[in-house]
């Protein structure tokens, strides 16, 4: 049994179709079928039920798939980490969701660069879902995102729970209301959520906060990205629930109000490949905690 057998089997199992799997692997279908047959002969078990459409795994096949995927993830991580160690120059590629750029991420990156000027840092704006894919493909080394993930190939450290706030046009009736707003105050407003795709996204976090309070907004409009949502808020076309760090945008036609509901929070996660313990990552995490400590920001401290 070789690594290629694992890759071929995982592709067939995930695609549930030999033709699509062959296209994904950029090989012809007959050689793929022969490789799967060779794998079954080597193991002495049937992995794929014969003559069943759509394709279905046997119990042994499902077991093999569950264990083959983590092995392939580890091989991919090992390749990426070894390539990094072998490079003469030290680099760190960072993925981030847009809202963190208006919060403390610039302070964190600046702190890291001050402490480690020998490392070249590059920044890439991408959604949390895109970050997970980029991490597994080796295109970034660390991601700052907001969504939970069950992907076992990714290690996720919860940095903090950031409160959500309401973004409003200055003349909006709720902008003049005394005290904090509640989610129930917002259900009859035109609610703008972002991003429209890919999902799940921050939009789902906002809608989940309403569901947890047993509330359903009357009017929900999905927009492509944060900047569009804020532009529409400024134009009086609706309101948006955003992380409090977005207040750093300082839009002259947008005001922000705090939300009283305790569960209206958005987590910030530090994501890396599961096996990756590179010094650059440990130092980046230390920079995060250093900035949080300086600003007395409540957070959860966890070792890489």
Image (cartoon, rainbow, N blue to C red):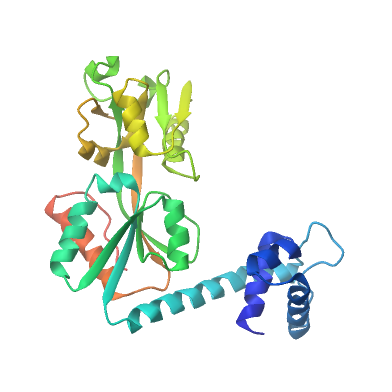
Would residue 208 appear left or right of 157 to someone viewing this image?
right
The residue nearer to you, when weighing 25 against 53, is 25
Residue 138 is situated, as x and y percent measured from the top left of the image, at 43, 68
- What residue appears at the point 24 percent right and 29 percent down from the top-left corner? 256
Q: Residue at x 68, y 60 (%)?
A: 15
Image location of residue 31, percent across then percent down: 75, 77
Q: Is residue 86 visible?
A: yes
The picture places residue 48, in percent across and down from the top left corner, at 78, 68
In this rendering, is residue 167 above or below 10?
A: above
Query: Who's the residue at 64% across and 65% down the image?
Result: 24
Is residue 214 visible in the rendered image? The answer is: no
Residue 112 quadrant? bottom left
Image: 97 above or below 241: below
Depth order, front residue of 26/14: 26
Q: Nearer the viewer, residue 297 or 37?
A: 37
Vertical position of residue 201 compared to residue 33: above or below:
above
């Amino acid at each position: 049994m070789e690594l290629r057998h694992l890759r071929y089997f995982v592709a067939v199992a995930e695609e549930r179709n030999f033709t699509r799997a062959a296209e994904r692997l950029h090989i012809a279908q007959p050689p793929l079928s022969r490789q799967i047959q060779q794998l079954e002969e080597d193991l002495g078990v049937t992995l794929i039920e014969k003559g069943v459409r759509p394709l279905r795994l046997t119990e042994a096949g499902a077991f093999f798939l569950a264990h083959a995927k983590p092995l392939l993830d580890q091989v991919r991580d090992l390749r990426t980490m070894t390539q990094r160690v072998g490079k003469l120059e030290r680099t760190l590629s960072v993925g981030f969701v847009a809202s963190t750029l208006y919060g403390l991420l610039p302070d964190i990156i600046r702190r890291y660069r001050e402490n480690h000027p020998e490392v070249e840092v590059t920044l890439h704006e991408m959604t949390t879902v895109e970050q997970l894919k980029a991490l597994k493909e080796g295109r970034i080394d660390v991601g700052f995102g907001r969504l939970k993930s069950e992907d076992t190939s990714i290690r996720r450290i919860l940095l903090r729970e950031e409160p959500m706030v309401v973004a409003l046009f200055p003349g909006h009736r709720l902008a003049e209301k005394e005290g904090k707003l509640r989610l129930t105050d917002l259900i009859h407003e035109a609610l703008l959520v972002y991003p429209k795709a890919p999902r799940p996204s921050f939009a789902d976090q906002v809608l989940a906060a309403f569901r947890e309070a047993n509330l359903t907004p009357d009017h929900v409009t999905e927009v492509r990205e944060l900047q569009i949502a804020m532009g529409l808020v400024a134009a009086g076309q609706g309101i948006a629930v955003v992380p409090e760090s977005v207040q750093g945008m300082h839009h002259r036609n947008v005001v922000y109000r705090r939300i009283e509901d305790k569960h209206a929070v958005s987590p910030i996660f530090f994501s890396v490949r599961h096996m990756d313990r590179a010094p650059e990552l440990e130092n980046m995490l230390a920079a995060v905690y250093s900035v949080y400590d300086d600003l007395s920001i409540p957070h959860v401290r966890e070792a890489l």
